[in-house]
Amino acid sequence: MTVPSLHDVYLLTGSNQGDRREQLSQAITALERDAGMVVRASGLYETEAWGLEGLPAHLNQALLLQTTLAPLPLLDVIQEIEQRLGRVRQERWGVRAIDIDIIYFDDLVLDLPQLVIPHPLMQERNFVLAPLNEIAPGLVHPVRHKTTSELLQQSSDKLLVWPYTPATDS
């Protein structure tokens, strides 16, 4: 009998609608129930909306998930979790109750119509890099061959990202 191998998957969760902290908490609970074990989690980060102006700020968190699932089955589970937690895909970069993105899957490089790993825009987004840097500063991007810390230092993203405090909650 072969034992399935564990994969290290870095995820970014985000919410800018409803009770954002509760959405992120529910996402972790659902991921642990349906996909694997969250073994590391960053603090929460408040971030300006990326892509569209005038939207509420996001709350973001980076997670390290250990899973036996392959990339596409994991994507299916993630999309099911998003739907259960109230995600409605109406407009790109619009308001959302929950968003769960696969940033890295081991050191895999994958380019499929439904899934690109590493996440193709991660190096351009401080709201990904700041929380990821908290839990994996030395993690090396398998294509760009730079650490998370280096990517964050070199990012041209001008949007603000700051540690979340409940006093800033709306």
Image (cartoon, helix red, strand yellow):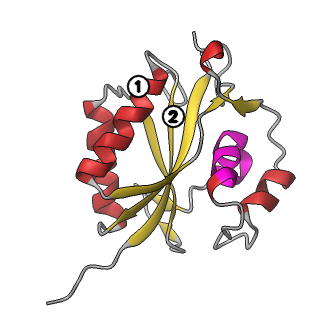
Q: Disc 2 or disc 1, which is closer to the eye? A: 1
Residue drawn at point x = 57 percent, y = 28 percent? 59
Q: Identify the disc placed on residue 59.
A: none
Instruction: Indicate the position of residue 35 as horizontal and vertical percent values.
Output: 29, 55
Residue drawn at point x = 50 percent, y = 60 percent? 116
Instruction: Indicate the position of residue 115 as horizontal and vertical percent values.
Output: 44, 57
Q: In the shown orientation, is residue 122 left or right of residue 107?
A: right
- Above or below, 43 relative to 75: above
**Image quadrant where one finds the N terminus:** bottom left
Queried whether the magenta region covers residue 132, the answer comes back as: yes
**Image quadrant where one finds the C terminus:** top right
Residue position marked by numbered label 1 in the rendering: 22
Q: Is residue 31 visible?
A: yes
Is 156 in front, or is 68? 68
Q: Is residue 96 visible?
A: no
Residue position marked by numbered label 2 in the rendering: 14
Magenta: main secondary structure: helix
Tag 1: amino acid: Glu
Q: CA distance from mark 2 to mark 1?
A: 11 Å
Instruction: Indicate the position of residue 16 as horizontal and vertical percent values.
Output: 52, 22
Instruction: Indicate the position of residue 163 as horizontal and vertical percent values.
Output: 69, 32
- Above or below, 49 relative to 117: above
Secondary structure of residue under mark 2: strand
Image quadrant where residue 130 sits? top right
The range drawn in magenta is 122-134
The furthest residue to the bottom: 1
Residue drawn at point x = 38 percent, y = 42 percent? 28
Tag 2: amino acid: Gly
* Label whose residue precedes the other's in the sequence (2 or 1): 2
Secondary structure of residue under mark 1: helix
Queried whether the magenta region covers residue 87, the answer comes back as: no
- Above or below, 15 relative to 81: above
